[in-house]
Image (spheres, rainbow, N blue to C red):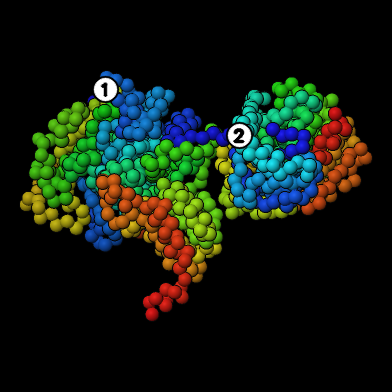
Amino acid sequence: MPRTLSFQQAINEALDQEMARDESVIVIGEDVAGGQGAEGETDAWGGVLGVTKGLYAKYDDRVMDTPISESAFIGAAIGAATSGLRPVVELMFNDFMGVCFDQIFNQAAKFRYMFGGKAETPVVIRTMIGSGFRAAAQHSQSLYSIFTHIPGLKCVVPSTPYDAKGLLIEAIRDNDPVIFFEHKKLYPLEGEVPQELYTIPFGEAEVVREGQDVTIITLAEMVHESLKAVEALAQEGVECEVIDLRTTSPLDEETLLDSVASTGRVVVVDEANPRCSIATDISALLAQNAFGALKAPIKMVTAPHTPVPFADNLEDLYKPNAEKIASAVREVSEYQAWKATASTS
Amino acid sequence: MESDSIHKLTMPKWGLSMTHGKVVEWLVPERAEVSAGTEVVEVETEKITGCVESSKCGILRRQVAKSGQDVPIGGLLAVVADLSVSDDEVNRFVEGFVLEEACDESASDDIAPEFVEVGGRRLRYLKQGEGGQPVVLIHGFTGNLDNWLFNHAALAQQRAVYALDLPGHGQSSKDVGDGSLDMLIGTLQDWLDALSLSRVHLVGHSLGGAVALGVALRSPDRVRSCTLIATAALGPEIDADYVEGVVEASRRKQLKPYLERLFADPSRVTRQLVHDLLKFKRVDGVPHALSKLSKNFVANGKQVAVFRSELEQVQSPTQVIWGEADQIIPSSHASDLPDPISVELLANCGHMVQMEAAREVNQLVLSFLEKTD
Amino acid sequence: MTLAKDDLLAAYRVMKTIREFEERVHVEFAAGEIPGFVHLYAGEEACAAGVCTHLSKEDYIASTHRGHGHCIAKGVDVHGMMAELFGRRTGLCGGKGGSMHVADLELGMMGANGIVGGGPPLVTGAALSAKRAGHGNVAVAFVGDGGSNQGTTFESLNLAKVWNLPAIFVVEDNGYAEATSSKWSIGAESNAERARGFGLHAVRVDGHDFFAVYDAAGEAVQRARDGGGPSLLDCQLNRYYGHFEGDAQTYRGPDEVKKLRADQDCVARFSKRVTESGDVAESKLAAIDQEVLELIEDAVAAAKSAPKPEAGDLLTDVYVSY
């Protein structure tokens, strides 16, 4: 039987194995050990949801707790990266990027270019995304699109334990700044993860399921919602191709265009807000480069243009799900150009 | 539960990770006659599509699983029985079977690969069957012990059959030293020592065939017989572009066309097959190991090691099996071999002949084993 | 602390090079030869020189938008800097950075920085690298009085203290953040006072006096090298030019700069002290003056004749690999 780990364990294992392999890898963040200076355990938390649990016991001073001081410790991780270390810094929730954004997009992202190609900044910023925890507007966003917009950053958004381990190891070994977005709903997800160290290259989307009728382009938790949706659709005779982006920067345009060239029908599924997002970006990419292949308008299934609400019924409404995805796919698969023309004439 | 008069066909376990299979198509209608070895139903796993054969003669009385249905390993696919068995008895058999299914599945879980440390390298191997004169299956370049998924169990009915992952392959250590064929041959010899296997039948595929030949030449007393399947080292010709491509390709789209050259029927190459090789190539140390091995295996478009002139010295009984449609190493390498060597060419099969014509290959190997035990 | 004659001459060469570099950039900018935003360090030379005399190329510094002086003091190539300011392909950053982003990581110069308060967190990280490497190296953040009011600076002071890092924060309080007086914008009595509140060793220093800076920095650097943690120097000094070139400086008092140049000039004070003490002959300084003028002249000529970046350069150096 193949070995399985949870998404969370896969990330922990990637950190553990890379720290064992390379002395220059250090882990920094709020409570990545937990309990510093207190009377009880000094390895109390292992990160707010326990992802780094156990690393402090093994690597001691290479797992560094910080004050709640994101500008300083994210900046410090970036400065350390330009001076010989390979920090993996945990920024708890990606919503907190606001307080240290300068260090990420004006400093880390720009060094290489503005210093004429002479700087390398091998830093990884791990951060949680995602709604569904009733955590409301400041702990539930999915902000990868903002970072995808910025040249100089790489953005990784894994959806499976296997990918999480391979992409994180790739991120740690990569010499550019990488933002590694972990959907907190995925932490308990179990999946096959080899014990050995392995890497998954950036910029390679994964065709999770092949199908000839409609292409669903998605990422993170929405990969799983999409897969739920396509099971029902297959019963109805609609075979969907499901593509998991895995990284939004670099973006695997080729796989998207290849798929759309054969299906001609596209649904983009993204949990994030819809304005200037990865969903609109992909829609624009396809409209510009695959117009001839399209048999129906591109459909986006996203959150609305609102903050993430608190009340459970509202949050459920906010979030895309299998049902919404299925109905978008039906609409796209049934669309016929002549009917649309007839209805508007 | 199986009686003398009622024979069951169950979902086989092809490869370590298989948990279930999907019935693609019935090749034999109900009420039709089947004999031992008749391919009855086509089954698709995530990795590969294969055929389940009847092990006995009789009438196909019941197609229990329907086309498109997922069946767990050990699950009942069909019932074969003579007409002397009544429909009621067949019904009772089918109804009674469901209860045993769980036991069957847990039994198949007992087969688990093991590891042994040989010369500083950790090698993985899988043993099936017990007793008899043991057999060792040696896979080819970029392969692993799962390459024998249609053969391993079938060959292990009467004896212990080992399949191992060569250094740099499968889950064995990725350290390939100087990457030479000598290293592979030496490692196999050391592995035989480590498992206290003093005398074995060797079955090698492709590069694994060259390894088997090497062991037979170096330690003739340890090799009871040699079965060389689409073997390397019998001539210089090889699809060097395949070897290079399979090492270099990093994406599904690049890799798939190369893998399709392995089979006469390219539709044998499933998504999962490509995916598994890609996954393997991403493991730390694998790209380096493969590139090192490939440089020792093929240079300037030709195989580096050719043992043809040394075949006369091989003392162990040897048979050569080849797919006529092999695109990687030409089946013409099976021509004009020294006399005691028997040659079997299988029509409409490619390089992975042990997969494409599993039944024929298994029969050839089994009868050769019996002859040479 | 006493300096050998060669060290004094070296320090003088640094200050003089900064001064002549800035005076010439002032002229070239006014003539329209240098594009963009330029912030001149003239008047503050003693601070950069006094601190960096203690540093080797294995030590780190991060600078500000007013960064030319720090670069020169850390040993960055003047030709490369000048070409960079002119936006030339031969510039230190290939013409992609300009005045505000001159950097030379090989020399531990982590970059001038266009973001006020951008440097201290980075230096905290470099200090962490230095601490982990265990070779006794240090990291220095230069910050203006403007930057001293940024949260990034406060956070970095705290983190450097919490992690006990070999970091030195040098506040160059030149009296103005852009057009706003530091007497008004710094609510505390001084930055030294603030730093003590964070638990750092801190002193206020006359930034016009090379020797005062040199001594204070020497203590701070030694403390850091010995594992004694971070310090802050609160250097009081003045700039001779505006916030940026083109600033009419109407916010400054009448003849303010004229008086500063006459009474407080750090280069003049240095010359006077070392010649009067008999440590250095005037002729030695005059010889350095001549060499520096020639260097700057040569750097400007080279920059002017150097090619601009090529169109293809637009798309390179965004990532190491992509």
Could you say which disc has been placed on residue A338 in the image?
none
In this view, the residue in front, C17 or A207, is: A207
Residue picked out by circle 2: B99
Please name the residue shown 11% across and 44% down the image: C185
Task: Check the residue under mark 1 and report the chain it is in.
Answer: A
In this view, the residue in front, A217 or A278, is: A217
How far across and how far down the image is residue B241, in percent?
69, 51
How far across and how far down the image is residue A82, in percent?
38, 40
Please name the residue shown 17% across and 41% down the image: C149
Q: Residue furthest right?
A: B339
Nearer the observer: mark 1 or 2; the answer is 2
* C-alpha span from label 1 to label 2: 58 Å
Is residue C251 in sight in this rendering?
A: yes
How far across and how far down the image is residue A221, in percent?
41, 47
Residue picked out by circle 1: A38
Identity, as a three-letter code, of the amino acid under mark 1: Ala
Residue A250 shown left or right of residue B138 in the figure: left
Is residue C9 in sight in this rendering?
A: no
